[in-house]
């Protein structure tokens, strides 16, 4: 296997350090628009299989050319969602398989955005599924932690725990604190603004996919690992678009434990128009307001040494168990920031995201997972993946509720 990772930010760099401990690949090219950043991440692996390169992720031809230059077999997309399509298309043009952690962007319904779906997350990628399948190529989409591991939990619950599922609810929360900052998101603020301020999507078997207002239906969810109760709200996320394609459930939701302060900041950004991606003229320059917000906030990859606490990603499932009785479980994965920093030098949220595509690449390399077309993690056997997560030293858990 010869891997091209596009993006040497927090997740791309963490994935490189994780992969350096494995032997399933021959070459790992870590590419970024900033060659020095890629080179720094490569140097941290102390591994001659790693090579740094420069690439423009917005240019499919540039991605394809880099693939061909290095004989790449698998492209791992570690840049933010606005670059999904050019990287996706560049991989296809080069005849390479593809993985990402976030899917092509949505566009709200033009007249009724808080009731009806417009272009949904991933629609543009699924539209290309036939071409990928006919070419014998796999695009494994949404294989981070959420989406990704959360979807694998959903498939595991359907296969091994339930005969009928009422609701699959992905629930994410943490008690992470960043010392010295009043406001410092632990993940890409560009992506956070996108998913939290877009109309969130809900799936119901009888109704299909529909939308509601951002931050709708707050609920208190009790998280394990010492995190405790956290208020969670609806946000737009890929699981709701992915899980129903492969897993039978009456309802699928995603709620995120943002906290009231975070929600207030996001609402203020929207009121001021600072969530916009369209460029505006400021003096002699043209800038995107959202890029400015991202530029003035700290890089999440640099926050690990100032961060304390635990992050939890998981999937809450209700329905009828294998014994015919009502059952409610929470399958989850905890990462303590102290552990991830000590073991890998990466803060908890980016490490928890990065480990999953590395495991998926290893399963593809050895042939345990196989497929063609545009597929989510739900399309594969979850057990080998969950076993690998334990093997990587970060086990998952199941909590009966």
Image (cartoon, rainbow, N blue to C red):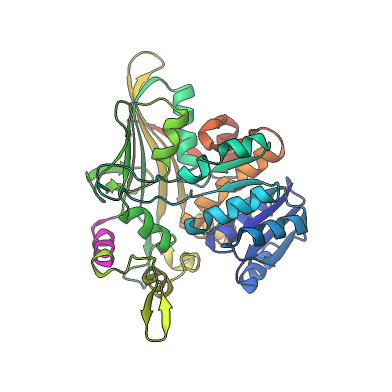
Residue 165 is situated, as x and y percent measured from the top left of the image, at 36, 24
Asked if residue 355 is positioned above or below residue 387 in the image, the reply reads below
Extreme-top residue of the structure: 324
Left of 152 or right of it: where is 314?
Answer: left
Q: Nearer the viewer, residue 144 or 92?
A: 92
Q: Residue at x 71, y 60 (%)?
A: 66
Left of 388 or right of it: where is 154?
Answer: left
What secondary structure do most residues of the magenta stretch adopt?
Answer: helix
Q: How many numbered marks appear? A: 0
| The magenta segment | 259-269
Residue 297 is situated, as x and y percent measured from the top left of the image, at 40, 72
Asked whether the viewer can see residue 390, the reply is yes
The C terminus: image quadrant: top left
Asked whether the viewer can see residue 391, the reply is no
Q: Quadrant of residue 241?
A: top left
Left of 135 or right of it: where is 311?
Answer: left
Q: Nearer the viewer, residue 144 or 71?
A: 71
Residue 34 is situated, as x and y percent measured from the top left of the image, at 60, 72
């Amino acid at each position: 296997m010869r891997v091209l990772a596009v993006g040497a930010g927090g997740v791309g760099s963490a994935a490189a350090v994780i992969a350096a401990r494995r032997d399933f690949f021959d070459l790992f090219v870590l590419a970024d628009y900033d060659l020095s950043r890629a080179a720094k991440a490569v140097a941290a692996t102390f591994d001659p299989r790693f090579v740094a390169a420069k690439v423009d992720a917005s240019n499919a031809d540039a991605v394809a050319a880099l693939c061909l230059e290095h004989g790449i077999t698998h492209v791992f997309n570690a840049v933010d969602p606005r670059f999904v399509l050019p990287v996706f298309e560049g991989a296809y043009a080069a005849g390479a398989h593809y993985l990402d952690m976030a899917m092509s962007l949505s566009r709200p319904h033009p007249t009724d955005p808080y009731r009806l779906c417009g272009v949904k997350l991933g629609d543009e990628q699924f539209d290309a599924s036939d071409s990928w399948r006919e070419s014998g190529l796999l695009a494994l989409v949404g294989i981070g932690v959420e989406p990704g591991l959360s979807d694998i939990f959903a498939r595991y619950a359907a296969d091994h725990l339930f005969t009928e599922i009422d609701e699959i609810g992905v629930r994410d929360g943490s008690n992470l604190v960043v010392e010295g900052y009043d406001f410092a998101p632990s993940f890409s603020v560009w992506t956070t603004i996108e998913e939290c301020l877009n109309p969130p999507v809900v799936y119901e078997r009888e109704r299909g996919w529909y939308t509601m207002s951002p931050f709708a239906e707050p609920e208190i969810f009790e998280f394990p690992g010492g995190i405790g109760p956290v208020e969670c709200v609806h946000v737009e996320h890929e699981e709701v678009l992915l899980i129903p394609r492969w897993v039978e459930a009456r309802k699928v939701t995603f709620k995120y434990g943002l906290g009231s302060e975070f929600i207030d900041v996001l609402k203020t950004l929207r009121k001021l128009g600072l969530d916009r991606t369209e460029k505006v003229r400021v003096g002699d320059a043209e800038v995107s307001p959202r890029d400015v917000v991202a530029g003035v906030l700290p890089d999440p990859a640099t926050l690990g040494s100032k961060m304390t606490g635990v992050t939890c990603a998981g999937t809450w499932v209700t329905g009828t168990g294998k014994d015919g009785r009502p059952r409610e479980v929470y399958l989850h994965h905890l990462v303590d920031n102290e552990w991830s920093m000590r073991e890998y030098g990466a803060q908890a949220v980016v490490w928890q995201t990065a480990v999953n595509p590395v495991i998926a690449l290893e399963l593809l390399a050895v042939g345990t997972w196989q497929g063609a077309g545009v597929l989510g993690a739900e399309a594969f056997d979850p057990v080998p993946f969950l076993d690998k997560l334990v093997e990587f030293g970060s086990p998952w858990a199941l909590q009966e509720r």
